[in-house]
Image: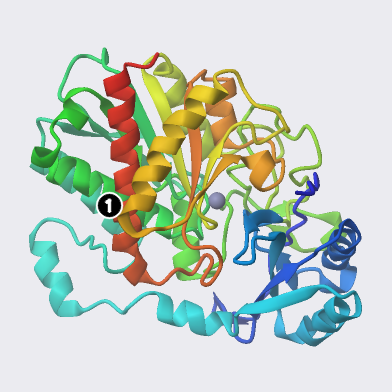
């Protein structure tokens, strides 16, 4: 495949605001297929055009992924979100340059409105009597997820503990659940985080599903917690997550302080991409942005964000114990192995690949969901400052992975809530498989 080492240049969309809530009425998601290097270059130029600023964005993580199509032709694709006022112009440009495309989502606002079923007050009351309101039938706010962490700690005090590892920039608790049957930290540990990118709602939902299975169904697989300690953080970016519920469904970054940007005149922009902010080859190339108004803004310095700093500090104090680092994102159905910052493979890549393969096999066996496995640089594009590279390169955690959850673009970031359980089941199968392989093989 052709590799394009370039900043995503994803400008935060400037969607019309209605009563404080961002509306995506008439926005369309297009999948475009540049079939030659020239078309790829043309496409990148198109996206960067000034008249498209804030109106056309590349939905990241799916940029120029190669996936073997039904006719066995390897193709590259990129998903572009277009505002209605430039859609006709954009399509004309694609046609004029012979770049084919499909419309994946005809009206994004409609997809957003039908993504999450409304709260059923009767059910809600019933469930709250159990001590928490979390379900796996809808996407929940941060407080419901938080109440589930507390519920597990109160209900299963012999194996569950909560720990607040820091505060977000808006003062929310950065909370994780520790699951352990004892041993004073002498057992190997697995770290799982979700929700680093705010809009990827399937990620926190899947992480809480893993907590449910691991703790509440522990009798089905006691060896998983007897042999391993778990550190699980379902919402790593709670400010962004809440903002994506309350105001802008497509918010990706943190919500740290406003930064003025000359290019945008008086406009001030918020937030940093928390998966470009880690202190490992941070900002070394053009794979992240120094522009505070873009979606992939790397921050004014590495670990500028209290969220990434708190996670890193916690992991570093347990770096000899943590053997597997998993971070859940969406979308594109890929199991990514470092490195992401360069087109090269780290020491121990073969072992990392074999363990990941066990996970992918178990995942695909559940309902046939097709995952790609490889390095981020191979499957997507190079990007530095991501958490999995840091976990491998700085913390020295041998098995470090990013899992890009479903789907492959039909719904993109707005995956309907009825997918939570099936995605949870298959991802849990993968987590079980790699844990068992890791402990059975006693790999170093
Ligand atoms: Zn992500």
| Residue at the spot 63% in from the left edge and 41% down from the top edge | 376
Q: Is residue 299 above or below residue 443?
A: below
Q: Is residue 436 visible?
A: yes
- Residue at image coords 73%, 59%: 10
| The furthest residue to the front | 71
Q: Residues within 10 Å of mark 1 (few under 14, many from 20)?
A: many
Give the SS element for disc 1: helix
Residue 152 pos. (x, y %): 16, 44
Relative image position of residue 285 (x, y in whole percent): 80, 36
Of residues 210 and 116, the one drawn nearer to the viewer in this rendering: 210
Q: Is residue 209 left or right of residue 16?
A: left
Kindly tell me whether residue 234 is visible in this rendering: no
Ligand 1 within 8 Å of disc 1? The answer is: no
Q: Which residue is mark 1?
A: 209
Which residue sits at x=17%, y=57%? 132
Which picture quadrant has residue 343? Answer: top right
Q: Quadrant of residue 359?
A: top left
- On screen, residue 181 versus residue 171, left or right, reads left
Lateral position of residue 235 relative to residue 394, left or right = left
Q: How is the image coloured?
A: rainbow
Q: Which residue is pictured at 77% across the width and 56% down the height? A: 9
Residue 61 picture location, percent across and down: 62, 53
């Amino acid at each position: 495949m052709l590799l394009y080492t370039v900043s995503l240049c994803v400008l935060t969309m400037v969607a019309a605001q209605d009563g404080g809530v961002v509306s995506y009425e008439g926005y369309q998601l297009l999948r475009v297929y540049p079939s030659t290097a020239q078309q790829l270059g043309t496409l990148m130029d198109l996206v960067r055009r000034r008249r498209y600023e804030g109106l056309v964005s590349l939905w990241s993580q799916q940029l120029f992924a190669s996936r073997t199509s039904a006719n066995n032709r390897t193709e590259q694709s990129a998903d572009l979100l277009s505002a209605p006022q430039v859609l006709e112009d954009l399509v004309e440009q694609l046609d004029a340059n012979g770049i084919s495309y499909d419309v994946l989502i005809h009206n994004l606002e409609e997809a957003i409105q039908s993504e999450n079923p409304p709260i059923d007050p009767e059910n809600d009351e019933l469930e709250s009597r159990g001590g928490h309101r979390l379900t796996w039938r809808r996407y929940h706010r941060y407080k419901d997820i938080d109440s589930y962490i507390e519920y597990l700690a109160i209900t299963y005090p012999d194996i569950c503990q909560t720990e607040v590892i820091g505060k977000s920039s808006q003062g929310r608790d950065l909370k994780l659940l520790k699951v352990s049957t004892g041993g004073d930290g002498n057992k190997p540990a697995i770290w799982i985080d979700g929700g680093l990118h705010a809009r990827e709602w399937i990620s926190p939902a899947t992480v809480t599903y893993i907590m449910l299975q691991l703790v509440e169904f522990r009798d089905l697989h006691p060896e998983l917690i007897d042999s391993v300690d778990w550190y699980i953080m379902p919402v790593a970016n709670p400010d962004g997550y809440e903002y994506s519920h309350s105001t802008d469904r497509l918010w990706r970054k943190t919500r740290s302080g406003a930064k003025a940007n000359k290019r945008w005149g008086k406009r001030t922009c918020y937030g940093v991409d928390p998966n470009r902010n880690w202190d490992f080859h941070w900002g070394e190339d053009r794979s992240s942005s120094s522009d505070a108004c873009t979606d992939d803004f790397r921050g004014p310095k590495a670990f500028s964000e209290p969220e990434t700093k708190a996670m890193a500090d916690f992991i570093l104090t347990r770096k000899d114990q943590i053997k597997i680092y998993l971070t859940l994102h969406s979308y594109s159905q890929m199991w990514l192995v470092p490195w992401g910052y360069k087109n090269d493979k780290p020491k121990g890549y073969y072992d990392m690949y074999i363990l990941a393969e066990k996970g992918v096999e178990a995942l695909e066996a559940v309902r046939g969901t097709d995952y790609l496995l490889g390095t981020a640089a191979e499957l997507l594009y190079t990007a530095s400052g991501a958490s999995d590279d840091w976990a491998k390169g700085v913390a020295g955690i041998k098995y470090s992975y990013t899992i890009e959850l479903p789907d492959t673009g039909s719904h993109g970031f707005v995956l309907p809530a009825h997918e939570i359980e099936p995605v949870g089941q298959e991802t849990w199968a993968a987590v079980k498989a790699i844990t068992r392989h890791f402990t059975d093989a006693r790999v170093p």
